[in-house]
Amino acid sequence: MVTAIARSGVYRWAIPLWAATLLSFCIGGIAHSQGYPARPVRIVVALAPGGGTDNLTRIMAPKLTELLGQQIVVENRAGAGGQIGADHVAKSAPDGYTLLNTDTSFASNPSLFSKLPYDSLRDFAPVSVLASAPVALVIHPSVPAKTLKELLALATSRPAMFNFAMGGFGSATHLGVEQFKSVSGIDLVVVPYKGGGPATADVLAGQVVMMFGGPSSLAQHVATGRLRAIAVTGEKRIPAMPNVPTFAESGMKGVDAGSYWGSLAPAATPRDIVNTLSGAMMKVLQMPDVRQRLINLGYEPIGSTPEDFAANLRSEMAKWAKAVKAAKIRVQ
């Protein structure tokens, strides 16, 4: 049985190792006897290269290739806060050869957009929750602030010098920006991007001075001094950025947006194939080398059954519907 505990917007999951491993082997054996997979499996990443979804998928892909015996092909289809990639997968053949890997935006988009080209629950078969992570507020080193208090004082006195790079509508980075604006009372200019990768590139170049982003794509730049981390969401500091305080430590409550990632298939995908994929993903996320690599990048590896992911999606959609309404956020 998988259990989930919601803390600061990030779900923490506990899976008995023996149960998940047994499930993986048993279900995998059933599906392989039926000939699946017989050709490469394509995972559509609904966001731009270089962001948290892309990094996570590409770390998992080689191990999934080994387990399934077929090449895992990663394809980026970014745009509209993940809608382009999601719509493509929703309309793909339900045969297990086209999957969707996406982030928090999948659960928040129904509340942010007046109309989606797909139904987030009816048109997809949940496969597995993959991981969760906080988001970090970083600034370009040209900004003369080293703490959240200093940043707030500077932004209050000189708001014209500040703009926010936002890595995709509906993502945790977008929701984090909106929470920060609401709590601080500072109306900063938000510059939208198709994903965390392009947003990070412009902050590194100094074209935009601050952003919320995933530790997986920011930690290396913070370590080399190319970016300065101010605070992270969540209840505690993370191994990827051990010297960066949480927002709560820094005296600011209400900024708690966190990312989580999951994999989905088209709705009518046969159940035995969905179970095979879920078992393989759980097994990959339990591998010590994969787990440690993900933890070092700021992820919390999870892995779940399709049933638990379905329940998680419904819970996340309800949670973000309340948050979006409270913050009066609307994209269109």
Image (tube, rainbow, N blue to C red):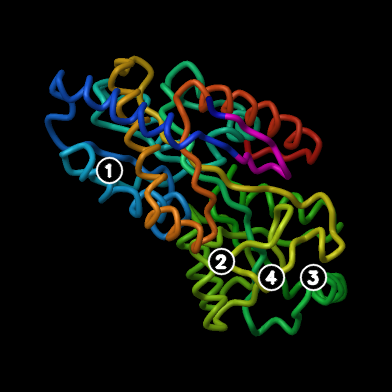
Residue 249 in picture, x, y percent from top left: 82, 63
In front of the other: 117 or 174: 174
Kindly tell me whether residue 169 is visible in this rendering: no
Bounds of the magenta segment: 3-12
Q: Position of residue 7 (x, y in %)?
A: 72, 42
Nearest to the eye among marks 3 and 1: give it: 1
- Residue underneath mark 3: 148
Left or right, residue 65 beside residue 223: left
Query: 10 Å neighbourhood of mark 4: few (<14), some, or many (≥20)?
Result: many
* Distance in Å between CA atoms under marks 4 and 1: 33 Å
Mark sitting earlier along the chain (4/1)? 1
Magenta run includes residue 226:
no
Q: Is residue 107 above or below residue 53?
A: above
Percent from the top left, x then y, of residue 130?
Answer: 46, 41
Does residue 10 show up magenta in the picture? yes
Picture disc at residue 64:
1
Q: CA distance from mark 3 to mark 1?
A: 41 Å
Q: Residue at x 75, y 36 (%)?
A: 323
Amino acid type, label 4:
Val
> What residue does disc 4 label?
244
Measured in 3D between alpha carbons, the distance from the residue under mark 4 to the one under mark 2, in whole angstroms, is 9 Å
Label 3 element class: helix
Query: Does residue 98 appear to the left or right of 283 in the view shown?
Result: left
Upstream in sequence: badge 3 or badge 1: 1
Q: Name the spot of residue 195 as percent of width and height, x first.
A: 48, 54
Q: Earlier in the sequence, mark 3 or mark 4?
A: 3
Chief secondary structure of the magenta portion: strand
